[in-house]
Amino acid sequence: MSLVAMVVLALSYFLGAVPFGLLLGRWRGVDPRRVGSGNIGATNVTRAGGRALGLATFLLDLGKGAAGPLLARGAGLDPGWIAATGMMTILGHCFPVYLRFRGGKGVAALMGVFLVMNSVAAVAAAAAFAVSLLAFRYVALSSFCLALTLAGTSVWLRGSSQPESITALACVLLVAYTHRANWSRMLRGTEERAFAPPDPGESADG
């Protein structure tokens, strides 16, 4: 491993770990960790501070996801290292050292990574998310559909042995893990649906 690769990997993790949802929430005088699911991702930030704050969180998380692979590409690293920096950015988002490794669920950062590495797969995944959300109105389920579509499209376009495909397949497991509380609520019938008035007794994906 070269020194440049080590530095870019470290920078990617620490950039991914920046908790934009929490920082924006504090700027608006709210703490998303004390609202809804307690997550600092865009969905729960929307619940805590409104749509504009949620959108800003999503765009910043998307941007930091893209930043890792762009750093690696700018440093002249090969596709394997580019995929590795993308994974480090996503892991930083999900397990930020600044917040005792309790971060977001990785979906926006994942999309940012693949907008750089495989934009066709990213667009297909976004479409799958939208269709699932309109059909079932569960953000967690739609996020998992996004991850599955991203992985499937990457494997189809590039082959299963390519670094970006391996990253996408790993992220299917990661997204399933970060949404584990949502699966439990869905089984109990208490998971909040999108486009529905909030119920104080329910919590949702973030």
Image (cartoon, helix red, strand yellow):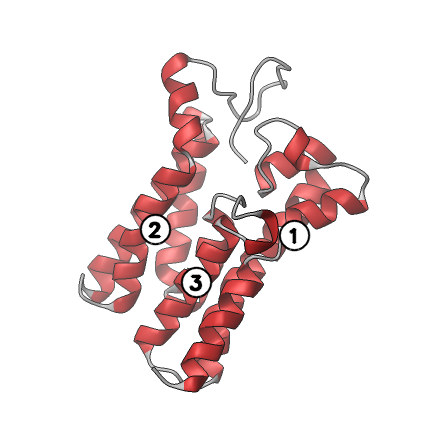
Which residue in the protein does label 3 denote?
88
Q: Nearer the viewer, mark 2 or mark 3?
A: 3
The answer to which of 193 and 206 lies nearer the viewer is 206
The answer to which of 11 and 115 lies nearer the viewer is 11
Quarter of the C terminus within the rendering: top right
**Circle 1 Cα neighbour tier, 10 Å, few/some/many (<14 / 14–19 / ≥20):** many
Lower sequence index among marks 2 and 3: 3
Mark 1 element type = helix
Q: Name which residue lies at 29% across and 53% down.
A: 170
Quarter of the N terminus within the rendering: bottom left
Q: Amino acid at mark 3?
A: Met
Instruction: Measuring from the top left, give residue 39's x and y in whole percent.
Output: 57, 37
- Residue 171: image tag: 2
Q: Amino acid at mark 2?
A: Cys
Q: Name which residue lies at 26% across and 61% down.
A: 165
**Circle 2 Cα neighbour tier, 10 Å, few/some/many (<14 / 14–19 / ≥20):** many
Visible in this render: residue 5?
A: yes
Given the current orientation, which residue lies at the most extreme front position?
Answer: 100
| 167 w.r.t. 71: above or below | above
**Circle 3 Cα neighbour tier, 10 Å, few/some/many (<14 / 14–19 / ≥20):** many
Instruction: Measuring from the top left, give residue 20's x and y in whole percent.
Output: 65, 52
C-beta proximity under 8 Å, tags 1 and 2:
no
Lower sequence index among marks 3 and 1: 1
Mark 2 element type = helix
Cα distance in 3D space between marks 3 and 1:
17 Å
Mark 3 element type = helix
Which residue in the protein does label 1 denote?
20
